[in-house]
């Protein structure tokens, strides 16, 4: 263990650069409603009588074929406080839709009933309005623990192929612990994790910081995760990113201030904001949400999400953690004890691998942080 202590002290300088902890303040996923949005929502709610039916929640099952014939399928491209903006591919039309009462009052472990990327059945109403009556089964989901309700899952996006885990070299500081949590969340949610490290141009002249960034990139690449150094100034990595995103549904997610929206603007050639998208397709309609889904010129979609300050793992058991660290899974077979936690047991092959540099110290730190949390939801 003495060598681990020496390694730890040597890494103190790096810890000032690669921050591993972050605060508990939740990002504001929804902003306050504006007056027009409230009026639209109230108008839709007046037409929706299902909220007065006491048995709706119990009768709610899969819609019959006859019911589906009278409904349309739309994809959620933007979230509002009481509904969503839907895009119907068949007609290339946008609709402002409220959640029908029977669906709204269902109980679930999810904080939000809808998320960006959801496919839904909805009832069309006049003036490009609608009622969402059912959410189709999700093929993949990106989620985290809700910071305010420990038992709730906060859905970030659904039905996507890959998570573009976006962090920066500096401003804000690189958080490898956040990368590792996103990798776990992507794998659990049936998605491919891709690591993007932005603002790479800002460290080119600082050899010490550049060496750390290169080590981080090499580590994740050796583990089999596509990892790209990105600069929107020099355009480094942009062509590679375009190739990775071609024909895929991707979600940009990560820290606040790392340049996710700037990347999307560069990739699409537009200064996309959700409000502008809605204004171009539905005159007089506005939205206050930050998250939105944008089509790509090279085919596929990308989703921009609000930056976060913390990422709590939802429903992750301690005995499951090590399976998401490939290098630990490989070394644990050599441990003296089959139930080794790789924290302080004698004869631990994982700890020896860290001492010898076979396992990156920052990855081992991420593992320890997860294992030592009394409540994984409070990280």
Image (tube, rainbow, N blue to C red):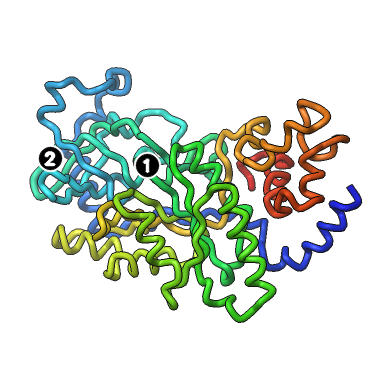
Q: Which is more foreground, mark 1 or mark 2?
A: 1
* Residue 281 position (above or below residue 249): below
Up-down relation of residue 316 to residue 265 (above or below): above
Image x and y of residue 349, in percent: 79, 38
Distance of mark 1 from mark 2, alpha carbons? Answer: 23 Å
Q: Which residue is mark 2?
A: 124
Comparing 109 with 33, the one in front is 109
- Dot 2 falls on a residue whose secondary structure is strand
Provide the secondary structure element on which disc 1 rests.
Answer: strand
Residue tagged by mark 1?
158
Residue drawn at (63%, 53%) of the image: 177
Pick the front one: 72 or 363: 363
Q: Position of residue 135 (x, y in %)?
A: 29, 33
Residue 65 to residue 164: above or below: above
Using the image, tell me which numbered label, if any, was put on residue 273: none
Residue farthest to the right?
Answer: 2
Q: In screen coordinates, is 301 left or right of 176?
A: left
- Give the left or right position of residue 200, taking residue 39 as reference: right
| Count of numbered circles in the view | 2
**Quarter where residue 205 is shown:** bottom right
Query: Taking 343 as reference, is 359 left or right?
Result: left
| Rendered location of residue 227, percent (x, y) | 51, 57
Residue in the image at 71% along x and 40% along y: 371
Query: What residue is drawn where x is 54% and y is 66%?
Result: 168
């Amino acid at each position: 263990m003495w060598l681990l202590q020496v390694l730890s002290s040597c890494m103190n300088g790096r810890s000032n650069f690669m921050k591993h902890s972050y605060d508990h303040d939740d990002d504001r996923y929804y902003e306050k409603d504006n007056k027009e949005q409230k009026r639209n929502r109230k108008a839709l709610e007046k037409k929706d009588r299902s909220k007065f039916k006491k048995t709706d929640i119990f009768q709610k099952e899969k819609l019959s074929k006859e019911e589906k014939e009278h409904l349309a399928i739309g994809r959620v491209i933007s979230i509002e406080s009481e509904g969503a903006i839907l895009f119907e591919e068949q007609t290339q039309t946008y609709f402002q839709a409220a959640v029908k009462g029977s669906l709204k009052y269902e109980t679930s472990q999810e904080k939000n009933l809808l998320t960006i990327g959801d496919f839904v059945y909805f009832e069309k109403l006049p003036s490009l309005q609608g009622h969402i009556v059912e959410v189709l089964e999700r093929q993949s989901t990106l989620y985290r623990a809700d910071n305010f309700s420990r038992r709730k899952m906060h859905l970030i996006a659904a039905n996507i192929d890959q998570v573009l885990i976006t962090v920066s070299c500096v401003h804000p500081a690189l958080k490898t612990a956040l990368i590792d949590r996103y990798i776990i969340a992507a794998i659990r949610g049936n998605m491919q994790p891709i690591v993007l490290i932005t603002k790479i141009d800002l460290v080119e002249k600082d050899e010490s910081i550049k060496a750390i960034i290169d080590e981080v990139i090499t580590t994740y690449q050796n583990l089999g995760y596509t990892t790209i150094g990105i600069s929107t100034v020099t355009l480094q990595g942009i062509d590679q990113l375009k190739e990775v995103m071609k024909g895929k549904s991707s979600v940009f997610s990560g820290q606040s201030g790392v340049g996710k929206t700037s990347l999307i603007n560069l990739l699409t050639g537009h200064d996309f904001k959700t409000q502008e998208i809605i204004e171009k397709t539905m005159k007089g309609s506005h939205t206050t949400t930050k998250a939105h889904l944008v089509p790509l010129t090279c085919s596929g979609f990308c989703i921009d999400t609000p930056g976060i300050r913390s990422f709590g793992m939802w429903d992750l058991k301690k005995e499951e953690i090590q399976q998401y660290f490939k290098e630990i899974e490989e070394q644990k077979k050599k441990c003296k004890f089959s139930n080794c936690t790789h924290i302080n047991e004698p004869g631990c092959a994982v700890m020896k691998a860290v001492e010898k540099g076979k396992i990156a110290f920052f990855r081992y730190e991420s593992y320890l942080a997860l294992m030592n949390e009394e409540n994984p939801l409070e990280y």
